[in-house]
Amino acid sequence: MNQIHAERPDLSIIQGRTVVVFGGEGVWGKRFVDAVRDKVQRVIVIEKGTDPEEMLRAVEESSVMILATPDPEIRGILEQARAKMHAELAIIDCATNKGLFEDVLHDLAEEGLSICTTHPLVRPQTPPRGQNVLLMPVGENAQIATDVARCIYRILGMQINETAFEKHSEKMAVSQQFPHQFQRTMIGVLGKTLAEMGISIQDVDKFATANTKLTWLAMGRTGFQDPLVSAGIIWQGLQTPMGKKILDETIALLEKIREIGNDREALIALFEEQIQVLDPDGTWRKTMGRQTDTILERLGNLSQGSFEITVPNDRGILVRILDILSEKYDIDLTALDSNIEYHDDGTSTAHFAMGITDTGEDIDVQELAEILEQVGAKIVLPEESK
């Protein structure tokens, strides 16, 4: 019989190692520390205020060096630590903007060090499970660092994709620069337009179409992030020929739409030509149709949702909650969604959003809350979560 299981990490690659994590108290740094702490011989955390001699000693004593600091700090760390780097040291970073220190990585690789630069393609506060990460070996001796990086990201449950380092900026121009560039443009134009109309972005939700709701998700995701993230991504992209071309093509297309905007047939022809270039056989469109229908259905169900349940994350907790809802209250769920919130102290909270059908009877919220409390759960009503 076939078995279903997640791809397991090869822990033998990191067992017995001493790992130094620069920025180990930051979000990504803490994820790395928590991932390997009980699987390696020793973890050393280095922060910005660490004594330089202590930092150099840590590098000298370690066989894995992970850089999880803000991108602009990495070059200085590499140059400062260089004096104590040794042949057994594997170096891994998780920066978004590699251009700030790319030349140093190449120099170290030429000196024989094992280096793998990585790029988790999700903000660090988001649960990493199922999210993409790029692994990019640097130089001819990158195998050990790449194996260590693969092991750590598998522990985190991420989808690993290996690619050439020299292609990173070009690929990020497509998958990061263009979306951020477009979404920041939307934020700017929409903000000004709505201000002139005297309405808020929340007001738009009341007359939003299905496509608008989906667009809002991407725009809202970018708007939620610190502007320095978009600035760094767009800046990095515009340092490449591909990034500049994407910006030029965007401007040219907007000018084309203005030019033919009064000709409906011309617009149809333009858009048909474009989608045939992007998706010649229609496979992508079919996939997107299914996925977006699923997302919209979940959004619709949950917008009718009744409450949220929060509880310390623990395997099996959902079964206990569902037992209470279905057996004791006969609640018919139409939607159930969840996400995990990670805390600085290493604990995590599970959030379960519940959409329910009308059971025909009013639910005694206070009574339900008291029963859920017995399994450590708390009920949050819609007005409380705003």
Image (tube, rainbow, N blue to C red):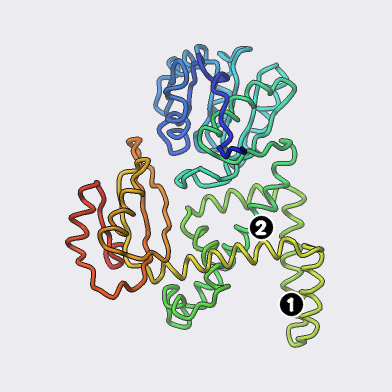
At label 1, counting other C-alpha atoms closer than 10 Å, the crowd grade (few under 14, some 14-19, many 20 or more) is some
How many angstroms separate mark 1 from mark 2 (CA)?
18 Å
Q: Residue at x 60, y 57 (%)?
A: 180
Q: Quadrant of the N terminus?
A: top right
Q: Position of residue 331 (x, y in %)?
A: 32, 65
Q: Residue at the location (58% across, 48% down)?
A: 232
Q: In the orientation shown, which residue stands out farthest toward the front? A: 1
Label 1 residue SS: helix
Q: Amino acid at mark 1?
A: Ile
| Residue placed under numbered mark 1 in the picture | 257
Q: Which residue is mark 2?
A: 178
* Viewer-side residue, 369 vs 36: 369
Pick whichever, 31 or 158, lies toward us.
158
Q: Percent x, y for residue 101?
A: 63, 33
Q: Is residue 74 left or right of residue 41?
A: right
**Location of residue 123 in the rendering, given as x and y in whole percent from the top left corner:** 51, 47
Residue shown at 47% from the left, 83% from the top: 197
Numbered mark located on residue 337 in the image: none
